[in-house]
Amino acid sequence: MRVEGIPASPGYAEGPLFDLEQPPTSYKARASAEEEKVALVSAIGKAVDRLAALVESADGDAAGILEFHIAMLEDDALSGPALAAIGSGQPADAAWRAALDGEIAGYEASDQDYFRARAADLRDIRDQVLRALSEAGEAAGPPGAILYGEDIAPTRFLETDWSEGGGIALKRGSTASHVAMLARSRGVPMVVGLGDEAQTLTGVALLDAERGGLIFSPSPAEIEAFRQSASSFADRRGAAKTFLAEPAVTKAGTAVRVQVNIAYPSDVDGIDIATCDGVGLMRTEFLFGKTLPDEETQYRAYRKVLEWAGDKPVTIRTVDAGGDKPVPGFTVEETNPFLGLRGIRLSLARRDIFRVQIRALLRAAIHGNLKVMFPMIAMPDEYAQAAALFAEEGVALAAQGVAHRLPPLGIMVEVPSVALAPEAFADVAFFSIGSNDLAQYVMAAARDNAAVAHLNTVRHPAVLRLIAAIAAFGRERHIPVSLCGDAGGDPSAIPALLEAGLRDLSVAPAQLAMAKAAIADVSV
Ligand code: PEP
Ligand code: MG
């Protein structure tokens, strides 16, 4: 019996199912409210220590996520209500659970994928502290198991031994969650959105995270077919590794630049700069987490990436808050956030915040080969205003004697108006196609809605025609054009992108090898 879901990290796993839904931990309440408060505070401290120990051995993304958890645990906004409930007579475990469940419910009710995905982080934090309270250990799945349940906590992922295979099958979950990001960067197969189909959890199951499905109680014929697909995938992935160290070229000998997309400065720790042509997109929204980062924090983050890249280019995008990436304290409530005040529109509306980022970028520019681009540009005037702010801040820094440099300024091509009428943008330094948004706006299909995922494809002739038009405009006017949407790392989209005239792609680091292998197979 096969249940369909959405692939979140490609691969195959065959193994016993392990139920992620753990029985509740048992906790013996102390005598007084004061003792209960001490018990909760010390459990939170233990959870923080445990996370801090994990940070030591974690790399890039993982360390960033764990640090985010530590910051949340140390935030009084979570412990305050729980301590107050203890004061009015509740035991520590019930008080903590109620406080966190209230927060989690709020996140789960959000109609935005980003916030729903953060509910998994909060559940993780809740359970870490409950475990510390009851001093219960972690129930680990058997090696090679497929972890199956509602959702999975990032720490649970990090504490699982994946050396013998295994995978993750979630009834709900999201491809935008932190765990999905970790699974992709570690190559752990993962499928989300399997739904509630009641199934027996005994025996072996088959996880097909290439097409997105879970087979319960498989027949011998199903096992046979599954193993063939799994071995063909393993062959493709193994063969792809040999492409990593070499520059990408097509079968016909055409060179293609392949850069990487990053979100956290620590992402670069796990990447060998020799395997890529630079950073084609650094999304800066993730620096804008719970609080708005100050100039110094941003400067250090940008400088780190620039120094890592040496003389290779690093394209940093100014903050693209809004849409599926809300930032508390910055973005506004809207009925249709994808068509609202997001990206450059919001930055120009909140210049106080934008100017801080501009100064950090101007100062960081002296440490490498920086390019800056603006997201969600629809009109030439938006580019002109943003460029004028860079010039103004440059003059102000010069007046203060602060070292800085004005980087080349380009734009994302992700709003159809730019792709349809590019002649209005002949003065930008470069174009970078955001195929995720371009496809959603051309096809009128939200990128975070699984029900319309079949419509949201760059391979539709309408989207490809726009990509080809921008590539041709760039060639004609000598303006470099690249593509940094997820399609750039998708082997099934790469032939069409190269045929549309693109020679510069930027992909998720985990997709680098497969993307180069796919390029080598194209005859353009
Ligand atoms: C895109 O839209 O394709 C893109 C690269 O930007 P983001 O996914 O961050 O919106
Ligand atoms: Mg975009």
Image (cartoon, rainbow, N blue to C red):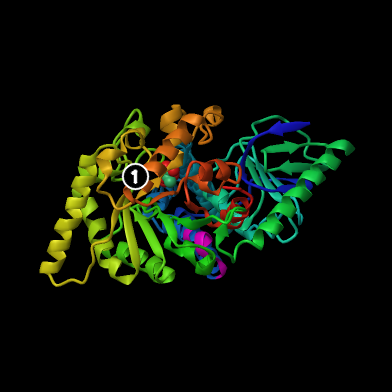
* Location of residue 69 with respect to 332 vertically, above or below: below
| Residue 379 is covered by the magenta coloring | no
Q: At which x and y percent is residue 312? A: 42, 66
- Residue 134 visible in rendering: no
Depth order, front residue of 423/411: 423
As for residue 61 lying within the magenta part, the answer is: yes
The stretch in magenta equals 57-64
Q: Is residue 429 visible?
A: yes
Residue at 33%, 50% in the rendered image: 479
Q: Is residue 522 left or right of residue 346?
A: right
Write down the quadrant of residue 191 in the picture: top right
Ligand 1 in which quarter: top left
Where residue 309 sits, quadrant-wise, is bottom left
Residue beneath label 1, please?
321
**Spot occupied by residue 189 in the image (x, y as percentages of width and height):** 67, 49
Which percent across, then down, holds residue 162? 69, 58
Viewer-side residue, 282 vs 110:
282
Q: Residues within 10 Å of mark 1 (few under 14, many from 20)?
A: many
Which secondary structure class fits the magenta region best?
A: helix
Name the kind of residue labelled 1 in the image: Ala
Query: Dot 1: what SS?
Result: loop
The correct choice, above or below, for 398 with respect to 234 in the image is below
Residue 469, image x and y in percent? 40, 38
* Residue 112 placement, left or right of 427: right
